[in-house]
Amino acid sequence: MRGPVTIAWDPSRNRSGRVVATLLLAGVSVLSLAPAAVAGKQVPPPPLPAQHRHLSGGFAFRTPEGWKVDSPPENPEVVNAAGDGVAVRFVYRDGESGYDSLHGACMLERLAGAMDMDPVVRYEYDFVGGVIGDRRALDSAFVVTYDKPILGQRQWRQRNVTIVGNGSSLCAITYAPLPLWKKSAPTRALLDAVLGSVTFR
């Protein structure tokens, strides 16, 4: 597993079981996820001026300036993006994988090894299906408790969105410290915006 700084990221989602997709640009499929269902006013998405493209050219996404974005040389399928106390990991594959098996595998992408966390996770929702443009999607969110604090926190909310279709497969995984996730509407808006910025070639 990579270190917590390179893989900590997390977006939000409502609990109604809907995955929402919109096409924002003609001919370009853009992932747009439903905002978190949280009491209070909606926070507008932050600006995401920095664009990043996977080495394959298969997809791109945007982040705020100053986020650290890298792809480990030993695993070129993966792109890690981190900043503002949260992180996002993308796992991209050319070809259409079985989206349920890929989703299950990507849910094991954690911030620490299996021996360094509580084996029981608390699910917010699990394997919610939907369609994003002309691609199939699955969405799960849960809380993982780590044995030792990561960036000062033991409990992290992890969300996995798997998108398969048009000859490619993508897992988008977000991580956020649970207290930050619960209390910070701007953090939820930020993670939603990063996921919503995904475009496919």
Image: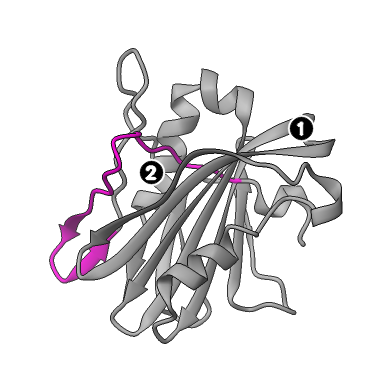
Q: Position of residue 52 (x, y in %)?
A: 48, 64
Image quarter where the C terminus lies is: bottom left
Q: Residue at label 1? A: 154
Q: Residue at x 55, y 41 (%)?
A: 142
- Callout 1 secondary element: strand
Q: Secondary structure at mark 2?
A: helix
Q: Residue at point 79% right, 52% down? A: 112
Q: Quadrant of residue 97?
A: bottom left
Q: Does residue 154 appear anywhere in the picture?
A: yes
- Pointer 1 or 2: first along the chain: 1
Q: Nearer the viewer, residue 38 or 119?
A: 119
Mark 2 surroundings within 10 Å by alpha-carbon count, few (fewer than 14), some (14 through 19), many (20 or more): many
Q: Which residue is mark 2?
A: 193
- Residue type of the residue flagged with mark 2: Ala
Q: Position of residue 193 (x, y in %)?
A: 38, 43
Please say if 144 is above or below 111: above
Q: Is residue 172 magenta?
A: no
Q: Which residues are magenta?
A: 9-30
Residue type for callout 1: Arg
Q: Is residue 130 above or below residue 92?
A: above
Q: Which mark is residue 12?
A: none
Residue 16 belongs to the span the image colors magenta: yes
Q: How is the image coloured?
A: one colour
Residue mark closest to the camera, 1 vs 2: 1
> The N terminus appears in which quarter of the rendering?
bottom right
